[in-house]
Amino acid sequence: MIMDPKTLAGRFPGDFVFGVATAAFQIEGATKTDGRKPSIWDAFSNMPGRVFGRHNGDLACDHYNRLEEDLDLIQSLGVEAYRFSIAWPRIIPEGTGPVNERGLDFYDRLVDGLKARGIKAFATLYHWDLPLMLAGDGGWTARQTAYAFQRYAKTVIARLGDRLDAVATFNEPWCSVWLSHLYGIHAPGERNMDAALHALHFTNLAHGLGVAAIRSERPSLPVGLVLNAHSIHAGSDDAADQAAAARAFDFHNGVFFGPVFKGEYPASFLSALGHRMPAMEPGDMETISQKLDWWGLNYYTPMRVSNDPVEGAEFPATVPAPPVVDVKTDIGWEVFAPALGDLIRKLNADYTLPDCYITENGACHNMGIEDGVIDDQPRLDYIADHLGITADLIGEGYPMRGYFAWSLMDNFEWAEALAGQFPKGNHRTT
């Protein structure tokens, strides 16, 4: 039964922020305009066999050229906030070296346009579009990329920080580490645990260096990190499956939450893979674990795992377990709202966490237009169910401060290509 919208809205405090979210590479297009140079995603999507249909981000939603009408669109929705990402290749096109003023000018117009419309600006500094030139030096597997990020963060905040309401260093490092360097699904398409472990530590380090850079420029700007923490459920009550779920939690969540909120990597992870990690330098963990003002959770679907019985299976040694409900989105993701509540409760039990925003939540449904309208009921049901869980959490005393629907508009859906073109799959693609 769907709750009346007014009744649902009444469950949220007056200062709870409702917004919509996007990412630069998914909507901007204009990949060769005004001094922007290629990112790893431009290279990746132009290689055959990487992205469905060989689609790329050259046009995407043409947001770069349609900025004013898109801002009007946000305003027309009546939301209070807009979460967007800034494209590093527009600001420092080669990753290091000259700053591109025309790139900063675009985000000046974006932020000023939000302010003029009374919409809060939540910026993300990194949503996966690493300048391609940095890939030549190893990209995220190289320590110096963390320092390049620090300079980029300082450059952006020096220019925009006075008008931002909040900033995140990274969006979903799980994707830019594991999905990109271990599973090979996202750019740069590596399938190599050693590369992934280097990318893990240097991404965490870049986050910490970025926090320091932001605070040096704008101490009062709320700074956070957006994580797609996984709500991990064992496939059975069997002890081996329960142990597999614990390993999976450490591997998919603990390697980010542990360093950032506890100053340490999980013990199970280090005992299995620590010898393959890059050298930790003095001060690394202190840099990574600086106190944050907020964190963002991107949640879509639970992760269900069982023990991998193969001898010598690499940590976390799990295999997918079947879903428990039949309701799925059009990219095959199980719809199970209670997992969102389970996840927030567990993370807050395991770590001391600051204020939380649901920074992405939504469902992929490819309904066509019939008689000029789209029957969006499955998506509305999905959002209402997850907002209901969020309201439950507020009632339990958890500091849930806002909710951003994904996404403002149909967009370039990474490896799954342009919206409406989804092959049936189960890739993590937001």
Image (cartoon, rainbow, N blue to C red):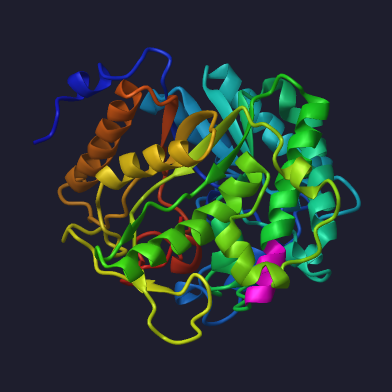
Task: Please check the rendered image and state whether residue 388 is part of the magenta-colored stretch, yes or no.
Answer: no
State the residue in front, 236 or 384.
236
Q: Quadrant of the N terminus?
A: top left
Most frequent secondary structure within the magenta stretch? helix
Q: Would residue 244 be found to the left or right of residue 265 on screen?
A: left
Residue drawn at (37%, 28%), measured in percent from left and top?
77
Task: Please check the rendered image and state whether residue 198 is part of the magenta-colored stretch, yes or no.
Answer: yes
The residue stretch that appears in magenta? 193-199
Residue situated furthest bottom in the rendering: 311
Q: Where in the figure is residue 48, as x and y percent of width and height?
A: 55, 82
State the residue in front, 224 or 317.
317
Q: Would residue 302 be found to the left or right of residue 118 on screen?
A: left
Q: Would residue 313 be found to the left or right of residue 386 on screen?
A: right
Does residue 93 lie above or below 271 as drawn?
above
Q: Is residue 71 visible?
A: yes
Residue drawn at (37%, 73%), measured in percent from left and top?
307
Q: Where in the figure is residue 70, as x and y percent of width and height?
A: 49, 36
Residue drawn at (42%, 45%), measured in percent from left and top?
409
Query: Which corner quadrant of the image does residue 25 belong to?
Result: bottom right
Q: Is residue 305 visible?
A: no
Does residue 233 lie above or below 63 as drawn?
below
Residue drawn at (63%, 63%), measured in percent from left and top?
270
